[in-house]
Image (spheres, helix red, strand yellow):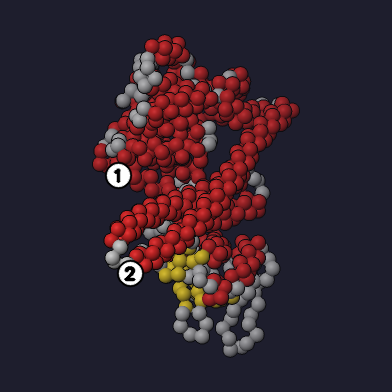
Amino acid sequence: MRTGLFLFLLSLCISSRAQTLPLIDYDSLFQRRMAVLSPVQRLVWAEKYAVFLIEHSRFGEARTLLQASLKVAQQAHLTAWTARFYELSGSVEETNGNLVRSVDFFLQALAIYQATYAFEQQQKLCVHLISVFTSFQDLAKRQVYSRQAATLQREYRQLSILPFMYADKADDFVIAGKLDSALAYGRKAMTILWVTRKWQQFYGYLDGYGVLSTDGGMYREAEKTFRQCLTYSLQQGDQRRELYAYIHLPEPLLHLGQLGEAEHYAKLALSRIELDPERQDEHRTQVYESLTHIAEAGGQFKQALAYERLSNQYRNAVRSVEKNRQIAEVEARYQTAQKQTRINQLSIDNQRQLTQISWQAAGLIALIALLALALWQYRVIRQANARLRASSQLVSENNRQISQQSDRLGVLMQELHHRVKNNLAIVSSLMRMQSRRLDDPRAVQAVQDGQRRVEAISLIHQQFYQTENLADVPIKAYVTELTENLLLGYGFDPDTFDCQVEVADIHLDVDVAVPLGLVLNEVLTNAFKYAYTNVAKPKLNVRLQPVTDGPATGLLVEVQDNGPGLDGPGLDGTDARLERSADAGASPTVSWRKGSFGQRLIRELTGQLGGEMSLTTRNGTYFRLWIPTPAGTGAANPGRD
């Protein structure tokens, strides 16, 4: 495999060396062209110049140019150009880590492309959205756009989009830890880009290929790949790509024992950090980490300590930027809440107007009745009929306006739940990133457990904005998706795992659905973590049904696994401390004493629901939760079409 990889890279290097593009002075060329063209004609050159600015990390200039060009395109009603500038704006925000804003831009562009049947552009937007939702860890949304992109590729077979599809597959294999398969799909993507002579994208993918090779321990191949990227960037004057080559080269050189050369490239990277102004602190953190490892390998421990301090300094700066971004998002949520308050007030005013109109209509009807008694006054009757027609038109117009206000309110509520869900996804991503930086396994476990609880709450809001009913949660879809996500998240194969989910098609009020979802998250997480360690054929049954017959009515939740039962570890990895029922004839039940956070959380949530829980051994561990009707009065509603 290594021989084939070497031959592949060597052939690309030799073939592409003769294919370098001529240098173009875009700055002066753009100024000359823009001076003689009309505002609409300038859009072609604005697009080319914006792409140039993005490729050279001049993001501030790119934003200004794109905002002005977008305004011109919208005023001229040029939908294709409007979509293109939305797409480029999304690329700028995605590159700088502003993922929420990038999704807004990409979705606006995608809507226009779908309305104009621009299938190739739709595929590109789907690839962008797949990348963003991968960063959000939103697997459901990612699968939606993956299927959409795959369908478009099968139907229209656009060669230009195929490299992005291969790159998406490579990302899937990286997430799954299958590095060899990821490298294979990376080579496929680069082959197509080389054949179609898209050199900028080719060398961008080649740089990513080198990073994967470094992660896989193929340091000699990684070194050759980065040197090829460096040669191209120097020939083309691409200073940003040159900077990335300097940042990436020290790592493979360090493992190859070339400490002097590794240090040389790391210091070259430091001297050119300003070429990527919006990611300076992130790059400095990476370079100083490399210098720390180089100094340690060379026995210069004092210098290594100095580099380590600098690395921590810039890492803290990056965290500060993230914190400011979170504060901005909180402010956005506050403004959204204020808008919601104004919407509620508008709804009250509309209701008051509707009441007044009703009284006016009643008065008009009474007037018509009186006028009917005076048939001999023909002229008076004609005037009454004319007033009646005018009033009917007024009522119809007011009803239409009220209907429009109601529709807007529903859309805004869906948007509110959507943004809350996105914000929770960001919190989950931040917790995941934080867990990777922790060394204490217990701290890592605690952060990961918190992340899954946040994701369980996020799923509630996802169910809200995906349905027309904004008051209740469709519990069947929620429990099914929660179970499937946890099963996949803990690395189980759905084809070999016998997972039976029997949930009634009912809707629950959010006050019941949120604590119930957190309880299920804790119980299912415990089962997937500890129940199947030595089980050849894992099996899990999840059942949620309303009970309406008998003296007591309510909601029954049951979770049954086929693990070792109560002799195994308890929630959160602690020993289950049990209390047996005092009645000899009663079935053995178990209640948790004060222990881990997960146990306390389940007890608190059960008390919040006014329910009762029990735990027994029944061919494995059997969890039962009973929620009586008074705890969720009006919460359980039949499923809606």
Percent of width and height locating residue 417: 50, 52
* Mark 1–mark 2 distance (CA, rounded to whole Å): 70 Å
Circle 1 crowding by C-alpha within 10 Å: few under 14, some 14–19, many from 20: few
Left/right placement of residue 337 relative to residue 241 reads: right
Residue 396 is at least partly visible in this image: no
Q: Residue at coordinates 57% horizontally, 54% vertically from top-left? A: 454
Identify which residue, 566 or 470, lies in the foreground.
470
Identify which residue, 153 or 195, lies in the foreground.
153
Identify which residue, 414 or 215, lies in the foreground.
414
Indicate whether 59 appears above or below 478.
Answer: above
Percent of width and height locating residue 602: 61, 66
The label shown at residue 151 is 1
Say which amino acid is labelled 2: Leu
Say which amino acid is labelled 1: Thr
Classify the position of the C terminus by image quarter. Answer: bottom left
Percent of width and height locating residue 51: 43, 24
